[in-house]
Image: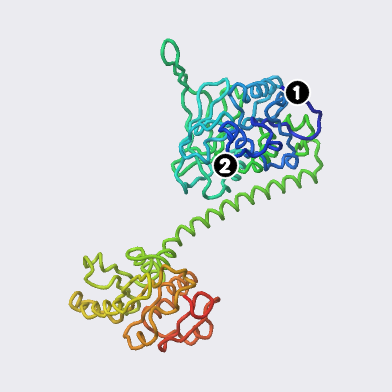
Amino acid sequence: MAARTSGPNGLVPVHIAVHEPAPMEEPGPQTNDYVRDRFAASTKYAGISWTEHGVEPRWLGMDTGTCAAAINPSHFSGHGADEFDRFLSGAASRGEPALIIATMGTADDDQDRVRSVFGPPGGRVDFRHFTGAIVGERLLAGAEVSLAPGLHAADRDLGLRLLNRPADAPWWTMTVQATALEGARGTTVHQPEGDLIPILVDSLGKPVVARWTPTDSEQIWYVVPDDVDWNQVIDWIVRHALPQHVPNALRRIRSRHHADPALQTPAETQARSSLEELERRYLEDKARLEDELARARQEADPVRDGLLYGTGSELEDAVAVVLRAAGFTVTELDKELGGTLSADLLAELNGSTCLVEVKAAAGAAGEKLISQLQRHREKWPQLRPDRPATCAALIVNHQHRLDPAERPAEVYQRRVVDELPFPVLASGDLFHWWRTQHWQAVQAAVLGQAHSEAERDDPPAGERGTSVGGRRRWRPWGREGTV
């Protein structure tokens, strides 16, 4: 092993149990799996700005006795076990806990199988010199995670950073399990040691990011999911994890991130405190806003997709959502009457009772859709004589295989609809009015009423008006001739 020592150069030595990525060349198509795995394991750390974070990486083959932390140390002989033991011995000799960051799972392996000796086994983290292991189970895509309650500052900061991972990044729930050893006399089970402290949890409260510490506190393990932003993690190690758990490591090398309160001026103390508070608020606000955006998208997607691309019940449900938002009382007639005896919806507002037929057409809408609504209007008095219909409307998602901006503005040519006793509306128009919360436009369009003079003079921002059949209609896509 190549010895390497350094004086107080201001850089924190951190062990990473892979070969240095800089001199490695990308393997060719004929390269064996061993070399490919070795290259893949190293390239995960290729984009880290080590010096900017105040860190000196110690790769395989380098001395690790003075390292302040270790990232994904290896238990395998010849592939990092010696470096791991030397790191642990160095920390013990200084009376410091060994700070270890390990990743759970393998992002590019859905089955969480062991890919190579250059990284942790998929879905499992084993301890060194302690019994037990943390076993992971990969969550389904789109899983929601949140901060666990009662965290101290370093754990909370890590949790906030990891909450900002991309929405499609994988997560694994974590469980501490016993260690089973096979021997001549059978299997011996050793109960797990230490405590697993959740930092981020899934919707069921199971940890997906956690800290594990044995009873003697000689080691502190942070377990994070694979596919993290290592620049964020390295920055957290220096700014928060080491000051919390191994403050002497920063003091020894005179790190610029070490701040001894007893040696600071009031101006330094105030500025640092304000900066830390600003960073904390930023991370909290960003996590909160991203959560709000995700919830807003989750609410909007069914309506948007239904109105612009939906057919059948998906389209009907989306239309019903918009009508209710516009103030209508909506009855789903297929459910109330059974089968398809009448129109799809009954919309009631201010004494008006409107039969609403909702249809989709992959191409140009056929006039058969008009005749269907006409038949429903004629049949309605027989079905509900106690509830007369005062109006009707046909809503069509026409040309739904085209991009919305490429669809014709009108469902039918004007000569077809000019003499109809009810309006024919494009579901794209309904979508835009819903998106801009222009409820008066929805009401007037469905009830077949003209907009007020004020609405004509001052349409909502981004809308253009055209006159069709004596009624004011808004072109929602920002240019004439498209819907």
Q: Is residue 69 left or right of residue 112?
A: right
Q: Which residue is mark 2?
A: 227
Quarter that holds the N terminus: top right
Judged from the image, the secondary structure of the residue bearing numbered disc 2 is: loop
Res. 148 visible in picture? no
Q: Identify the image quadrant of residue 264.
A: top right
Near-viewer residue (306 or 163): 306
Q: Tell me which numbered mark, 2 or 1, is placed earlier along the sequence.
A: 1
Verify CB contact (< 8 Å) between mark 2 and mark 1: no
Q: Identify the image quadrant of residue 67.
A: top right
Residue lying furthest left? 382
Q: Is residue 3 left or right of residue 299?
A: right
Residue lying furthest top? 185
Above-or-below relation of 382 to 421 = above
Query: Label 2 amino acid?
Result: Asp
Which disc, if any, is residue 3? 1
Near-viewer residue (232 or 76): 76
| Residue at 45% over, 60% down | 299
Q: Is residue 261 left or right of residue 244?
A: right
The percent position of residue 102, horizontal first and vertical second, equals 58, 33
The percent position of residue 397, horizontal first and vertical second, equals 38, 71
